[in-house]
Image (tube, rainbow, N blue to C red):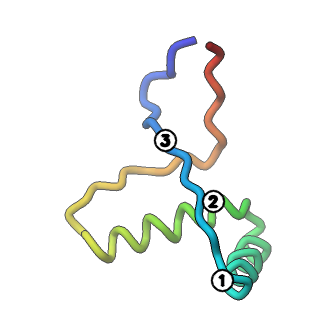
Amino acid sequence: MARPKGRTKTARVTINLDERAYALLLALADRDDAPVAQVARKAVVDFLNRMEPNIDQGSLPLVRPQREDN
């Protein structure tokens, strides 16, 4: 199945957090009633925007992309 038009391609990233950072991430996700991944994505995009404001980050999807069948 082809990727739907208008969707941006995403990449999976794995990070390691110390216990304090992970606890804070969980607390923010719980406070906002949001998935941890969504909170982490927003944090990364906010950081990148502060570090390099000329990079267009576009909009992040709020739903999980559907998997393509090979």
Q: Position of residue 36 (x, y in %)?
A: 71, 64
Using the numbered discs, state the Cα–Cα distance from disc 3 to disc 2 in whole angstroms: 13 Å
Instruction: Tell me the SS state at disc 3.
Output: loop
- Mark linked to residue 10: 3
Instruction: Tell me the SS state at disc 2.
Output: helix
Upstream in sequence: badge 2 or badge 1? 1
5 or 45, which lies in front? 45
Using the numbered discs, state the Cα–Cα distance from disc 2 to disc 1 in whole angstroms: 15 Å
Name the residue located 36 percent from the left edge and 68 percent from the top edge: 48
Q: Nearer the viewer, mark 3 or mark 2?
A: 3
Asked if residue 45 is positioned above or below residue 50 in the image, the reply reads above
Q: Are marks 3 and 1 in contact (CB under 8 Å)?
A: no
Q: Position of residue 70 (x, y in %)?
A: 62, 13
Q: Is residue 6 left or right of residue 67?
A: left
Q: Amino acid at mark 1?
A: Ala
Q: Pointer 2: what residue?
A: 38
Q: Amino acid at mark 2?
A: Gln
Q: Pointer 1: what residue?
A: 21
